[in-house]
Amino acid sequence: MEPIHLILRALQLLFLIILTGLIGNVIALDVAASSTARAAINFSMFVIVLSWLAALFGLAAALFQRIAIPLVMLALDAAATLFTVIAGIVLAAKLGAVNCGDTAKGHHGRGWIAYGSGDDSKRCREIQAGTAFMWFLFAAFAAALTMAVMSWRRTGRSVRSGGPTMSQVGV
């Protein structure tokens, strides 16, 4: 097993731990957010859960090659990559380029994503940090997916195995 696979999976898990805390706290402290803001935050948590599944299965497959199912790994990495980029775009679009120290009501519009907690400034900062880490997670999944596809094309078989092919076995 190449150490780069393990490093990428470890980075994914680190980003996921941080994202789970940030977005989970935004959900936990929600008192009066608009329905569109809730939808964006809930979608982000869905993406985080999906990414946990992909990262944990990828780590297990990197450590134990017997459970490495190449098509499942490609599908999970592809889904996680696609959904993380969508969540990153949604969070960035809903939040906008904003100074979280100035979250006066009505300044950003009624349904702004950072409105809806007892401390809108804190919620804004958590969503900003969540957006940044969602993009970091996307980069980690995109790198893992790129390596998996390159390995698949090179060997034409399992993404994780390194044994000889049938054409290399003497008759």
Image: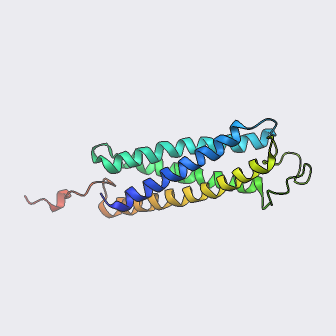
Q: Horizontally, is 62 left or right of 166 in the view?
A: right
Q: Horizontally, is 114 left or right of 127 in the view?
A: right
* Residue at 43% over, 51% down: 74
* Residue at 21% over, 56% down: 163
Q: Nearer the viewer, residue 157 or 27?
A: 27
Furthest residue to the left?
171
Q: Nearer the viewer, residue 92 or 17?
A: 17
Where does the image place residue 145, in percent across and percent down from the top left? 45, 57
* Residue at 40% over, 48% down: 58
Where does the image place residue 154, in percent across and percent down from the top left? 32, 64
Q: Horizontally, is 73 left or right of 52 in the view?
A: left
Where does the image place residue 120, in percent across and percent down from the top left? 80, 47
Q: Nearer the viewer, residue 156 or 164?
A: 164
In the picture shown, does residue 79 fall above or below 170? above
Furthest residue to the right?
106
Where does the image place residue 73, in percent across and percent down from the top left? 41, 48
* Residue at 53% over, 42% down: 50
Q: Nearer the viewer, residue 110 or 18?
A: 18
